[in-house]
Image (spheres, grey):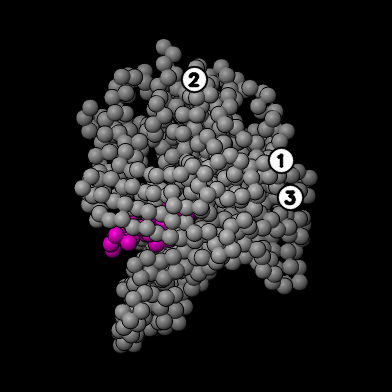
Amino acid sequence: MNGVELAIISSKFQGICQQMANTLMRTGRSGVLNTAHDFSCCVLNFDNSFIAADESLPVHVLSGPDIMAKNIDKFHPKKKKGDAYLINSPYHGGSHAADHTIIVPVIDEKGIHRFSVCAKAHQADIGNSKPTTYMADVEDVFEEGALIFPGTKIQENYRNIEDIIRMCEIRFRAPEQWKGDYLAMIGAVRIGERELIKMGKEIGWKKLEKFVEVWFNYSEKRMRETIKKIPSGNVTITTKHDPFPNLPKEGLEIKVNVSINNKLGKIKIDLRDNPDNLPCGLNLTEATSRSGVMTGIFNSIDHTIPPNSGSFRCIDILLRKGCIVGIPEHPFSCSLGTSNICDRLENAVVQAFAKLGDGYGMAECGSLLPPATGVISGLDPRNNNYFVNEIFLFHTAAGASPSADGWLTLTGMGSAGLCLLDSVELDELRFPMIVYRQEIYKNSEGAGRRRGSPGAYVEFGPLKSKMKIAYASDGSYFPAAGVRGGGNAAKAQQYKIDKFGKKINLNIVDEVQLKENERIVSITQPGGGYGLPYEREINRVTKDVLEGWISNKRAYDVYGVKVNSWGQVNKKATLKKRKELIKIYKSKKKYDR
C-alpha cells in the first residue's frame, strides 16, 4: 500500500467519525451535547484496537473504547448484525458513569465482524442520588446512585430492547431529554456502521485489513522517530489536588514517574506509587488513568503524530489495581473520573516533559469543575418541567506552551478545547436563569515568557425561580503551576451574592441552592506560565495591558515593562527593571508569583 492510498483511506475513516459526530451534534437533545459538544466518536478494529476518531475528547477515546469493546466480547461472544450495546461502567472500561457509550459491531454480508463503531456522550442526568453527574463527596458507587451498564445489549435486529429503555426512563430525572440523546447516539453509530459497510464494498475488506496493519506500523514509526528527538531522562513529578471531602486535609498528593529512552523510542509512565482507592467520587478508572497519561504525552510531542494503537505501542503505562490513579476496585466511586485528579495527572505528565529541557512540555492547565461549568437543576416555572444540565459558561484554563500563550477556551486538558462554551442567549432561553457577567479576570494569568490564559469571572443566577448548582472546584488551594521559571496561576474562587448584595464564601465542593434574586460567582482557574516572565517580548506585555488583561503595575512588577495606559513604553525604566528581575531570579533560583 503506497502513501497516497494510506492518506486517502485514513481520511475516509476520519470522515466517517466526522459524520457520526455531526449526527450527535445536530440531533442531541440536551445542551451538554448540542451546544457544549461533550461527546466523542471513534472506530475500532475487530480486535478492539483503536483506529481513528474525529475531533474527539482525548479523555474519551485514547483509552476506554478498546477496554469496553473487550468486555462486551466477554459478555456477548456471538454478535449479530443489528446489535448495539450500552456501557458506562467505570469497572469495565468506562470513563465515568455519566458517559454513556453505544458500541455497534460492523458485520459484513458474510457475517464476519470487521470493525466496531463507538459513540460516547456525557448525559445531563444518570439517576444519581442528587441531580448532578459529578458527585465528589460520596463514599461509593451505591451512594452515587448511577444506573450502571457493564456492556448491556440495548438493540437487537436494529430494534430497541424496551425493558432497558424503560429502566432508564423511570430512573432519570428528565427521561425525554435522555431518550432524545440516546436516539442521537444510536443514529450516530448506525450512520458509522452504514458508511463502513459501504467503504468495505467499495475498497474491499482485504484492502482495509491491510490498511489497518500499514497504518499502525506507520504511526508507530512516526512515534519512535519523534521520541528519539526528545532527551532521555527519568523525571518524577508530584502534584496536589485540593482537600475535597474524604481526601487528606493537606490535599491529595499524586506522583507520576516519566521515563524516556530515546535510543529505543519508548516512553514509560509509572503511576503505581499513589494512594489506594479512597471513599470519594474522585477515583480514576483504568480508561481515564491511561487516557490521562496519553493526553499529557500527545500534548508534549509533534501534533502530527496519529494517536492510535500503532503509536501507542511506544508507550508503557504501569498501573496498580485498587489505586486512586489506576484500576478501581468495586464499589469505589469514579463519578469525577474524567476531571479533577485526571486533570492533575495530565498536567503532571506535561510538567515532566518540561523538566527535560526548554521547548518541551507545557505549564499546568487549570482544573475543573467550577460553578461556571457546574450542573444546574430545578423546576422551570414557565412550563412546570424539571430541568437538569451541565452548563459550559466561560472557563479558560489553558497553560502556556513553549511557543504559545494559553488560549481562552480550553476548559480542561482532557477535552483539548473541543467542548464548546455555551451561548448565553440559548441558556437563558432553555433554563430559568440569567447570566449577569462573563469577563476576563484581570491579573490572574500564570506569568511567563509565554503566559497562561487569564481566569474568567462568571456571575449567574435563577430567574423567578430556585436553582441548584452542583460543582467540585479544584484549584482553590493549589492553583495551576508554571514551569521553567513561569509563574503559578491565581486560585479559583466561588461565592454567593444574596438578595441584599452580601458576599458569602462557598465551599470548594457543594450543591448550592439559589433563591430568586440570588447569584453565584465563579472565578475559574487560569493556566500556568512557561519560562521567565522578564523574557516576554515587550510588545506582548504592552498588548496585554491595552487589552485590560493585566495592569500597568503587574506589567512593571512581574514582567519588568514600564508602560502607560496608552501603550507607550519607557525603555530606560524597562531595561533597569528587567536587570533587577534577573538578579532576583538568579539569587532565588526560582520565580515567585
Q: Quadrant of residue 43?
A: top left
Give me the disc on residue 173. Answer: 1
Give me the disc on residue 378. Answer: 3
Crowd tier of the residue under label 1, counting other residues whose Cα lies within 10 Å: few below 14, some 14–19, many 20 or above: many
Residue 99 in picture, x, y percent from top left: 56, 40
Dot 1 falls on a residue whose secondary structure is loop
How far apart marks 3 and 2 lie (CA) works out to 43 Å
Figure quadrant of the C terminus: bottom left
Residue 451 in picture, x, y percent from top left: 40, 67
Q: Quadrant of residue 165?
A: top right
Residue at numbered disc 2: 77
Residue 11 in picture, x, y percent from top left: 34, 34
Q: Is residue 1 left or right of residue 28?
A: left
Q: Any magenta on residue 348?
A: yes
Q: Quadrant of residue 360?
A: bottom left
**Above or below: residue 200 compared with residue 223:** above
